[in-house]
Amino acid sequence: QVQLVESGGGLVQIGGSLRLSCVASVGGTFGAYSMGWFRQAPGKEREFVAAIIWSGTKTHYADSVKGRFNISRDNDKNTVYLQMNNLRPEDTANYYCAAALAKYSDSETSYEAWGQGTQVTVSS
């Protein structure tokens, strides 16, 4: 079993930056899990943002965040991060981290565990 707790959300101005963190409590080995970040804006479906393979050597991003967001992980700290730069109003959403024993994926169905989310609001 995996329990995930996100933090780091908040209110930021256009062009600003935030770093989200997700700490995992794992019954097994955190390094066995690929991790992903998803987001859900009001009235919209949840969408993929970024994913990182268990080793941290491969990452995958949604086109909308490429070049602005960076996903990383520290397996010694059971933590995955999402560095978000040059934020835009359309990045406003509740951000969720998720864990998957399978290969990292942009599909929600690949993930077995989800956090409660952290709210990011980008304002002018």
Image (spheres, rainbow, N blue to C red):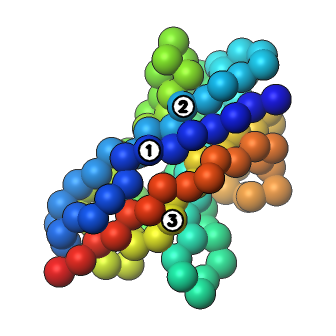
Q: Does the residue at mark 1 contact the one at mark 3 (Cβ under 8 Å)?
A: no
Q: Residue placed at 28% from the left, 51% from the top?
A: 18
Q: Which mark is residue 118?
A: none
Between 58 and 73, the one nearer to me in the picture: 73
Looking at the rendered structure, the kind of residue marked 1 is Ser
Name the residue at 49% across, 17% down. Answer: 77
Q: Position of residue 37 (x, y in %)?
A: 56, 51
Q: Which of marks 1 and 3 is nearer the N terminus?
A: 1
Query: How far is disc 1 from disc 3 in space, using C-alphas?
Result: 11 Å
For mark 3, what is the residue?
Answer: 94
Question: Tag 3: residue type?
Answer: Asn
Real-space CA distance between mark 3 and mark 2, rounded to the nearest whole angstrom: 17 Å
Under mark 2, the amino acid is: Val
Residue 38 in the image, given as x and y percentages of width and height: 58, 58
Residue 7: which disc?
Answer: 1
Location of residue 13 with respect to 74 vertically, above or below = below
Residue at 52% of width from left, 77% of height from top? 41
Q: In which quarter of the image is the C terminus?
A: bottom left
Badge 2, how many Cα within 10 Å: few under 14, some, many 20+? many
Do residues under tags 1 and 2 come within 8 Å of each other at their CB atoms?
A: yes
The location of residue 97, given as percent across then percent down, is: 59, 47
**Quarter of the view holding residue 81:** top left
Is residue 62 visible in the rendered image? The answer is no
Q: Which residue is drawn at 54% across and 82% down?
A: 42
Mark number for residue 23? 2
Rendered-image quadrant of the N terminus: top right
